[in-house]
Structure formats: C-alpha cells, structure tokens
Image: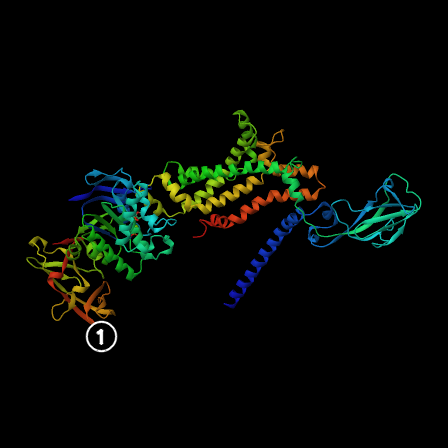
Amino acid sequence: MDNIAGSKSSLRWAVHLSVAFLVVLWLIPTVGLLVSSFRTTDQISTGGWWRALMTAEHNLILRTAPPSTQTQINGKYVVTGSLAKSGTDLDIRVWGVSSRAIDDYTPGATAKLSKGGEITVSKDGHYRMEHTLPFTGKRGTRIFLSSALPPEFTLDNYHKVLFDPKNVEGMGQAFLTTMIVTIPATIIPILIAAFAAYALAWMQFPGRALLVAFIVGLLVVPLQLALIPLLKLHLNIGIGKGFIGVWLAHTAFGMPLAIYLLRNYMVGLPKDIIENARIDGATDFQIFMKLIVPLSFPALAAFSIFQFLWTWNDLLVAKVFLIDSSGQTVVMTAKLVEMLGTRGGNWEILATSAFVSIVVPLLVFFSLQKYLVRGLLAGSVK
Amino acid sequence: MTQLKLSNIDKSYGNGVCVLKDINLDINSGELLVFVGPSGCGKSTLLRMIAGLETITAGELQINGQSMNDMPPSKRGIAMVFQSYALYPHLTVRENMAFALKIAKQSPAQIDAAVDNAAKKLQLEDYLDRLPKALSGGQRQRVAIGRAIVRDPQVFLFDEPLSNLDAALRVATRIEIARLKESMPDRTMIYVTHDQVEAMTLATRIVVLADKGIAQVGTPLELYNTPANEFVAQFIGSPAMNLMPGKIVATGEQTTVHLDAGGVAISNISTIDADAGKVVNVGVRPEDLMLASGEFMLEAKVDITEALGEYTLLYLQQTDGAENFIAKLSGTHKELRDQTIQLMANPGKVHLFHEGLGMH
Ligand SMILES: Nc1ncnc2c1ncn2[C@@H]1O[C@H](COP(=O)(O)OP(=O)(O)OP(=O)(O)O)[C@@H](O)[C@H]1O
Ligand SMILES: [Mg+2]
C-alpha cells in the first residue's frame, strides 16, 4: 500500500513539475513579446525585455547648437542651450569632449575644448560654452555622454502599428482583413457541420454509416492536395481570389473535423430525450434547435475555438485564395512575413505587430477553454 | 370498449433477429395493462412499437379503430414516461412540462393552466423553476409523469418508471400512480415492469410475455390462480411455484397423481378417463405447502431455513438430490433445519400441467 501511495504522490509531483515547466516555456516568449511591444527603440537596443524595469545606461553623441547662435555677453562669446532633444530628458552620469574619453567629467564640471574655450554641462543636459574669441565653423561641438535611461513604457508602438492615419505599417488594415476572413470562416462551417452532424447522428437514412466513414477518411487528406484544383475551380466558376473564395476554402477544409467532432458529441446525447421530444411532437428541426444545439454547446464551442485559431493563424490558404497583387487583402500573418523583410531591425514594431496578431486568439482561448476541454473529452469519459 | 388493437404484430430487427412474433392483444379504454416477462423478452420493444418509436415489421396496430402503423408518435394520442426520466436537462421543470404544448402552439394561458394543474397533482409546485439536475430521483420521475399528464393523452405508456428509485420511494410512487390512474378513469395506461408487486397491485390485466409471444393475459388473480402454462406459473408469484413430475393414476372430479419421488398429490382439477396414465407436472406454490402427517406429497430434507419473522422459507432437497423445492410456512421454523419433513397441500391449490400447459 505504501508503495502505491508513494508512487502516486511522486507521479503527482511529476505532473505538477511538467505543467509548471510547460507554463514557463509558454510564458517566457509571450511575456517577452508583450513587454517588448511597450518599449521604445532606444530601450530595446540597451537590453533585453527582462531588464525593462531597470534603469539602463546608454552612450550618446550629441551636438551643441551651431556657432551661428553665439551671443556676446560681457565681452565673451557664449553658446547656451540643452543637449536633450525636445521632448526627451537626459540624466547624465559622465561626459567628455573626446570620443576616447567620454567619462572625463561629471555633470557640473567644466571642460576645456580642444579648439579653445570651455564648456560646462549640467546633469539635465543644459550647457554653457564660453570663449574670448568667436566660435567658428558650421556645426556645434560634439559632446560624448553616458546617460541613465529610466524604465519607460509607451503605447506609441500600438498607435503607430494600428491607428496611424497613413497606415504606414498596414497592420490596422491587416487586422481588419484577418477578422473579415476569420469570423465567417468560423461561423459558416460550424453552421453546416452542426446540421450534418445531427443528421449523421440521429436521422435514419440509407448509406449513413458509409458517409460517416467517408468523412473520417477525409480527416487524413492533407489540404495541400486540394489547393491547386480548388483554386482552378474558383477561377473557373468566377469566384476568383477574394473573401468568398477564402471563406469557402476554410469551410471546406474545416468541415471533416467539424462534422466528426460534433457527430461524436451528439451521438452521446441521451437517446430517450430525443425520442421523448419526438413523442412531444417536435420535428427534426425543432429537436435540433431546441435540444441538440443547447446540449451540444461545449462541442460547438470547442470546434469554434479550433477553427478560429486555425484560420486566424493561417497563411497558406490566405495566400492561395485571397491575397492578390492589389495589396488590399493582406492578412496579418502575411503582413508579418512582409515586415520581417522590410522592418527587420525595428524590433518594437515587429514585437507589437506580433502581439496584435496573438492577442485575439489568446482572449478567445482563455474565455472558452473550459468548453474546449469538455468538448474534446466528450465521449471518451462518461 | 376496445381502444388499442394489436393484430398479428411481428418485430424483427435489421439483422434478421426476430424479437416478437404474432402478438394479438385488445386493450380496453380505461385499463391499466402491465407487461411483464423475463429480461430481453421484448416488453420495451412492444411498448415502443405502440409509441411509434419502433417500426412494426408486420401486423397492424389500431388506436380507436384507426391504423397507426405509419402514424408519427406525436399523432397517436400517447405520452411516454421513460425509465431514465428523459427530462430535458437544460430546461426548468416548468419548461420541461410546457415543451410539448409549446410545440403544439397552445396559448401561454393554456400552457400555464395545464402546467400548474399537473404540478399541483404531483406536488411539484415548489420546484417549477428548478433545473432537473437540482431534483431528487423521485422528483424527476414525478416531473416526467407530469410532462405526460400535461399533454392529456388517451394512452399513457410507462417503461419501468420506478426501477431507478429506492425501495421506499418505489412504494410511495407506485401508490401515487395508482391514485393518478383513479383520477383519470377513462385514460388507458400501459406499464412495463420487472417488479411483481407493481404488476399485481397496479394492473387491471397483466400480459406475460415470453418466448417472442404472449404467454398469458389475465387479471392478476387469474394468473396467480389459474396459470395457463408452466412458464406463467413459475413467473408469477415469488418464490416460484414448485413443479414435481408424476403420473395420473385416478381421474374424475378429483385427480390423483403418483409423484415420481414417491408422494401422492390430489388435485381438485377434474379429468376424464382418457387422461389416466398421462405424465404431468404437479405445481404447488411454496405458500400452499404445509406440514403433513400420514399422507404426504413431498418428502425432503431441509437444507436451509430463512426465518423472516412472519414466515419461514425452507429450501428443500430431495433425497436423490435431483430437484430442489421451496416451502413457505407461516411462523418461525428454524428447528426444521437438516430434518427430513413431509409436506402436503390443499387439493384446491394443486395445479396440473401436461406438456407444459395447465389442465383446468
Ligand atoms: N436495435 C436493436 N437491434 C437488435 N436487437 C435489438 C435491438 N433493440 C433490442 N433488441 C433485442 O430485442 C430484445 C428485446 O429487447 P427489449 O428492450 O424489448 O427487452 P425488454 O423486455 O424491455 O428487457 P428489459 O426487461 O431488460 O428491459 C432483446 O433481446 C434485445 O437484444
Ligand atoms: Mg426494457
């Protein structure tokens, strides 16, 4: 007995540990993406997302105002101003006037300039440059400094990616396109499949068993086989590339799994209930609407999640049946691929775009996951 | 008046298995007819054919003189109560009971009146807004019955409605059904059960099904007192009737049988001279056996006694060990264990069966 109890609890530990491991494995990239999407370009270049809450240091090369702005005060030529670009703050740790020694001076100290004169730089980047002779040259003097970068989070990336009026990144448009593809591509197959599943589960007609077997067979047919013939068909019957085409394609590819899942669930509903409804005078349609649909809700929800996630993340079917040269119908997955090329260096834009594309699936999954489990386990446990 | 008429009804399933054959039965309006029979003999099948849930392979079913073979269940004027209750799990008790009426497009006022009326009859008023899962087994069963009442059918069909209830509740619900039947004297009920007591107490007539057909139809006491054959004799009554082989030696007003085991049985069943010498089975119910002195019918050793206070069951083993019998004596008789006793029965209680069929 002790043995059994012992192995049971160690098994439980193994389960707990592996669950924890999976959770961590899943959380690290997701949280990383989320954090990165709120950081600025500067911050992303100073360190990884796990340092987002710490103050970072970064080295800058900034110029004073050009000599043309100098004024004469008490017989001295003076240039004043702030090194900080408008709208940003500096928190200078050390600074210098030569690229070889950027940490010569502390804020408030005065340095001699190589071309003559001297400069004082305060902590916040304000400076005063003085010389008895006029400053010459076109450009200001270079100051090398190391500034503290406080943690900073911004919604700018989201604004840029989603709501930029000029839609430079195109992500807002792509988000809408994906929605337009996904929602009908989830609803249409589930509507058709629910009716089919009811008929296959509860209505008597010749060839029913064969039909079920055929549908199970279709489950293992890879969709790549059908891409070209199906596209040809679409072109021939005049649907062409576009939303209707992609809806139909997703419907067709999702149907076998949908019918299979729903039929299995519906077959498990108690026969007496349906017979009683027959005696009560309900037609097949009424039985379907008033009993089967409400009682099959877990299975319907489970399949909707699957179909939604799969169409949302789909690239292949969209590329084949939807995206044409007009560029008006680019879905998010395709947009992301495009951006990897054009904006490969702009991690904050990529991270934000990526997060935009996963946030809806995450919401859907977490709000409906209890049905996912119930719908999938249906029939396997009583 | 005959309300349901079953003529030459056969039932076989797709794979060629014949379940019922040549069923003929007239059911009068206002009857409470009970189907009994061993498990798997086709009781549910017959009931479901009457309900229209199962096709009739051959023969004809008439209700009120109209052929029902191809009539959908909802048009037959029947309501059915299932063993599993078959409540709609996502609907409240009220919605469950209103379901059929809503389908029939009755007005909300009518529906409410019918539901409230049924709820009152079955003491369900307090539960009308609950879901079935929040009810006890007995309450669920009452909802199922209420759902049938609401539709006010001509014929109620019950398929083992009480078998999921515990013993005490079963008795209470049985009495409730009897009362319900009394309150609706012109409604017909057909009731399937395994339970002898239910069958004996509720039925106006019992139909014993066996071997794909009807073994006997009759009132409970007819079946008990004059079973038509050995099957019914052993099926009705508990413990089952003892059957002892023997040979007729004297005929007339009374018949005398010499039993193979050595005893002599005298029965009030009259026989003609031609019956003399026939091989028969003598049937005696355990409760009709009594201790004998002198003339005896049965001599056997008491193997086990079961004293239940009111009466004692004696499990008897004949000396050659071939047959076992049961006797039921009133009072406590534990002391008889391991003794060899002699038993006899009142001639009025001795049944005779020739080739399986009862002689009367
Ligand atoms: N769909 C079916 N296909 C083939 N045979 C069936 C089918 N349904 C029932 N049977 C057979 O018909 C016979 C009668 O079944 P039925 O359910 O009527 O028995 P029953 O008398 O109600 O038994 P119980 O008292 O156990 O409920 C059984 O032998 C069963 O195996
Ligand atoms: Mg049955």
- Residue reaching furthest bottom? B335
Give percent across and percent down for residue B273: 6, 54
Res A136 quadrant in image: top right
How many marks can you see? Answer: 1
Q: Is residue B235 visible?
A: yes
Q: Residues within 10 Å of mark 1 (few under 14, many from 20)?
A: few
Give percent across and percent down for residue A382: 43, 52
The disc labelled 1 sits on which kind of residue? Glu
Q: What residue is at 39 percent from the left and 41 percent from the top?
A: A288
Q: Is B177 positioned to the left or the right of A347 in the image? A: left
Asked if the beta carbon under badge 1 is closer than 8 A to the nearest atom of ligand 1, the reply is no
- Would you place residue A293 above or below residue B237 in this image? above
Q: Is residue A98 visible?
A: no
Q: Nearer the viewer, residue B284 or B338?
A: B284
Element at label 1 = helix
Res B289 quadrant in image: bottom left
Q: Nearer the viewer, residue B109 or B141?
A: B109
Residue that numbered label 1 is attached to: B335
- Would you place residue B332 above or below residue B7 in this image? below
Badge 1 sits on which subunit? B
Give percent across and percent down for residue A102: 85, 51
Q: Is B62 positioned to the left or the right of A145 in the image? A: left
- Would you place residue B301 above or below residue A239 in this image? below
Res B321 quadrant in image: bottom left
Give percent across and percent down for residue A145: 82, 50
Q: Is A27 positioned to the left or the right of A149 in the image? A: left
Q: Looking at the rendering, in which quadrant would you find the C terminus of chain B? A: bottom left
Q: What residue is at 85 percent from the left and 41 percent from the top?
A: A69
Q: Nearer the viewer, residue A71 or A154?
A: A71
